Amino acid sequence: AETKNNCDKKIFAVILDGPVEKSFNDELIGLSNEICEKWSMKFIIRYHPTSGMKRKYKGRYILEISKESETIDELLHRVDFILTCYSTVFLEAIYYLKPCFRYTEGRDNYKGIEACYISNIDQFQQIYDCMIKKPDDFQKFLQETREKILGDVSKENMVKKIQELAYRE
């Protein structure tokens, strides 16, 4: 299912990591607030399944908390792009050709995968500008990235391939 990346919804999803990554989650929320301030957007928070949704984030840019029952596929259809740190949702988003920004600072679980890597608002803006101003080029970039990372994998085999990539040393 290919998507048109024109950011007309003005909504993105923030995919948080587990509770051991509290500082990265806090930084991710901070970056999300900067993005919302600069581009008049809102975001949906998706907690990690192991978090038990214990830490509550509040803010004027938070549209809602994604329900645990909502599938990633359903969430991807409701947003313009994904912002995450280490979540495997990054790979799912790439599979579905949904723009996904990976916030990493100092370490990266996806060694050798440099697509949509950001560590600050300026890097986000460079990629975001390309996504908005050159949507065909950006779509081609996503397709090439999917091919490079996941190969010609079927939807049925996507989960296995993602697990292989996410848990390699």
Image: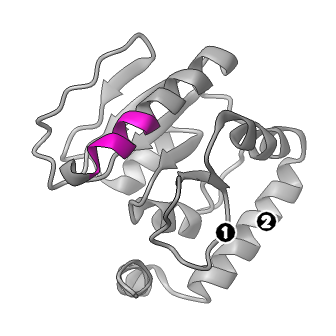
Residue 142, image x, y percentages: 71, 65
Q: In which quarter of the image is residue 28?
A: top left
Residue that carries the numbered disc 2 in the rendered image: 141
The one nearer the camera, 67 or 109, is 109
Numbered disc total: 2
Residue at the front extreme, as displayed: 106
Q: Which amino acid does label 2 sit on?
A: Phe
Q: Is residue 153 above or below residue 24?
A: below
Question: If the image is split into quadrants, where does the C terminus sit?
Answer: bottom left
Q: State which tag comes first along the sequence, 2 or 1.
A: 1
Whether residue 48 is in magenta: the answer is no
Q: Which residues fall within the magenta stretch?
A: 21-28
Neighbourhood count class around disc 1 (C-alpha, 10 Å): few under 14, some 14–19, many 20 upward: few
Residue 157, image x, y percentages: 41, 87
Is residue 4 rendered to the left or right of residue 54? right
Is residue 97 rendered to the left or right of residue 27? right
Is residue 78 rendered to the left or right of residue 40? left
Neighbourhood count class around disc 2 (C-alpha, 10 Å): few under 14, some 14–19, many 20 upward: some
Q: Is mark 1 on a helix, strand or loop?
A: loop
Q: Residue at x 44, y 83 (%)?
A: 165
Residue that carries the numbered disc 1 in the rendered image: 114
Q: Residue at x 68, y 20 (%)?
A: 39
Q: Which residue is drawn at 29% across and 37% down?
A: 66
Q: Which residue is drawn at 59% across and 50% down?
A: 101
Is residue 107 rendered to the left or right of residue 4? left
Measure how far apart labels 2 and 1 are at the Cα level. Answer: 12 Å
Magenta-drawn stretch, dominant element (helix, strand or loop): helix
